[in-house]
Image: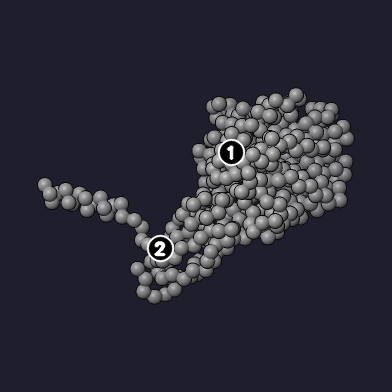
């Protein structure tokens, strides 16, 4: 019985475990991505947090990823699995631009 | 109000127009009156926004609608020039639709960029507000001797505002069929001229439409997007941006960035948001009056 309970608890813990800690955090602040360029490794997670009073988005220029609308204080994360340079912008304010550089090497 | 009855409310109901779809999909209509008339522009309602300086945009949109419904002479139509919603969410469109359904006058809506976030946002906007005879979102109509043109400059991926070649071709054909003396009124969300480039307050290919409009004697261009009343003239073309019904933004270049004026004292909000009445005079001149809610 105790073993069953422990198994159930472990399964629950696994199912609700938080996403991987981001290797980089980008703030959307004063209509800019801060920092505008981040360097990560394959498998790393990048998180974006909207600090502005207005809404923003994080849209890949190649449409590889798309956050949808991010409300004030809302965050969104994406895992970059392969090496490369991933340019992105805000769909609502296209002059807001950033890039994620995923460098070859040992990642997660 | 049921969806079907709302769609009847959007567009032509009550205008008493006869309209046809001509070659090239151009929508034309026979004017039914030569007497002066009024219409109303509202804009930037941002249903779903919930921060300072306005934590309840539905209530301020409702106040604007009630003021319009109380006008002694009802406008022939109300045009919402976009950003009905804040995040293009289905629930936001639904709330906006419910509120706008209480307008007494017929309603037209064109999208702002906040109504077109991702492909889902654009789809939801068109489902909720596109006219059946103009599923792409842009259209033209005639009323009281005036030619009205509603354009969309927020649908392009990675550039905003941008009209795009398909719509530019349609505008070119539409305007080619108009007399130089016909008064022209153009609606759009983002200003067609460059208000302030560092904040993206411009339409990249807006100059092409402005060039097409130069030959007309009397042109009025009505936009939203920047949440404030600005007036600008180029030759015979008068540009008027409108206040929103949700919140004001800073004057061009007067802050580090655009966005809601979050430090606005609460008691000043209603004096910065509202709606616009436009009276078309006998000779087709459009006289606009901006009416704030407080």
Residue placed at 36% from the left, 74% from the top?
A106
- Residue B257 in which image quadrant: bottom right
Label 2 chain ID:
A
In percent of width and height, residue B273 lies at 67, 40
Please tell me which residue lies in front, A51 or B155. A51
Figure quadrant of the C terminus of chain B: top right
Q: Residue under circle 2?
A: A22
Identify the residue at the far left of this view. Answer: A1
Give the spatial CA distance, label 1 vs label 2.
35 Å
In percent of width and height, residue A98 lies at 55, 64
Residue A26 is left or right of residue B231, and the answer is left
Q: Residue under circle 1?
A: B57
Residue B148 is left or right of residue A99, and the answer is right
Figure quadrant of the N terminus of chain B: top right
Local secondary structure at mark 2 = loop
Residue B145 is left or right of residue B65, and the answer is right
Please tell me which residue lies in front, B233 or B64. B64
Local secondary structure at mark 1 = helix
Residue placed at 21% from the left, 50% from the top?
A9
In percent of width and height, residue B108 lies at 67, 35
Label 1 chain ID:
B
Which of the two discs, 1 and 2, sits closer to the camera?
1
Crowding at label 1, few (<14), some or many (≥20) Cα neighbours within 10 Å? many
In percent of width and height, residue A94 lies at 61, 58
Residue placed at 85% from the left, 38% from the top?
B285
Crowding at label 2, few (<14), some or many (≥20) Cα neighbours within 10 Å? some
Residue B198 is marked as none
Residue placed at 82% from the left, 38% from the top?
B286
**Residue B204: in sight, yes or no?**
no
Depicted B196 relative to depicted B19: above or below: below
């Amino acid at each position: 019985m105790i073993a069953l309970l422990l198994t159930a608890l472990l399964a629950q813990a696994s199912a609700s475990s938080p996403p991987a800690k981001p290797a980089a955090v980008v703030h959307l602040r004063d209509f800019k991505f801060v920092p505008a360029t981040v360097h990560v490794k394959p498998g790393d997670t990048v998180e974006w947090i909207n600090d502005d009073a207005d809404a923003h988005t994080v849209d890949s220029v190649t449409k590889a990823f798309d956050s949808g609308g991010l409300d004030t204080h809302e965050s969104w994360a994406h895992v970059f699995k392969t090496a490369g340079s991933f340019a992105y912008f805000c769909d609502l304010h296209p002059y807001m631009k950033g890039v994620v550089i995923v460098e070859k090497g040992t990642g997660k | 109000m049921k969806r079907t009855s709302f769609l009847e409310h959007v567009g032509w109901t009550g205008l008493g127009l006869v309209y046809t779809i001509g070659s090239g999909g151009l929508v034309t209509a026979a004017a039914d009156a030569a007497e002066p008339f009024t219409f109303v522009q509202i804009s930037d309602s941002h249903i779903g926004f919930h921060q300072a300086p306005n934590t309840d945009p539905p209530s301020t949109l409702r106040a604007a609608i009630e003021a319009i419904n109380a006008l002694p002479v009802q406008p022939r139509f109300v045009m919402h020039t976009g950003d009905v919603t804040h995040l293009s969410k289905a629930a936001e469109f639904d709330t906006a639709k419910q509120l706008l359904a209480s307008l007494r006058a017929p309603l037209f809506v064109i999208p702002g960029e906040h109504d077109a976030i991702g492909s889902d946002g654009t789809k939801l906007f068109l489902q909720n507000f596109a006219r059946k005879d103009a599923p792409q979102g842009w259209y033209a109509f005639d009323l009281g001797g005036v030619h009205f043109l509603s354009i969309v400059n927020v649908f392009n991926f990675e550039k905003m505002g941008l009209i795009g070649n398909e719509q530019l071709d349609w505008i070119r054909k539409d305007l080619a069929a108009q007399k130089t003396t016909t008064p022209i009124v153009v609606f759009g969300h983002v200003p067609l001229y460059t208000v302030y480039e560092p904040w993206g307050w411009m339409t990249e290919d807006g100059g092409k439409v402005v060039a097409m409009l130069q030959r007309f004697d009397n042109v009025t261009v009505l936009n939203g997007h920047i949440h404030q009343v600005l007036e600008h003239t180029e030759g015979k073309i008068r540009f008027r941006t409108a206040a929103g019904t949700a919140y004001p933004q800073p004057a061009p270049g007067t802050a580090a960035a655009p966005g809601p004026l979050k430090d606005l004292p609460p008691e000043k909000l209603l004096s910065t948001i509202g709606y616009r009445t436009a009276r078309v005079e006998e000779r087709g001149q459009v006289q606009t009056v901006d009416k704030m809610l407080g």
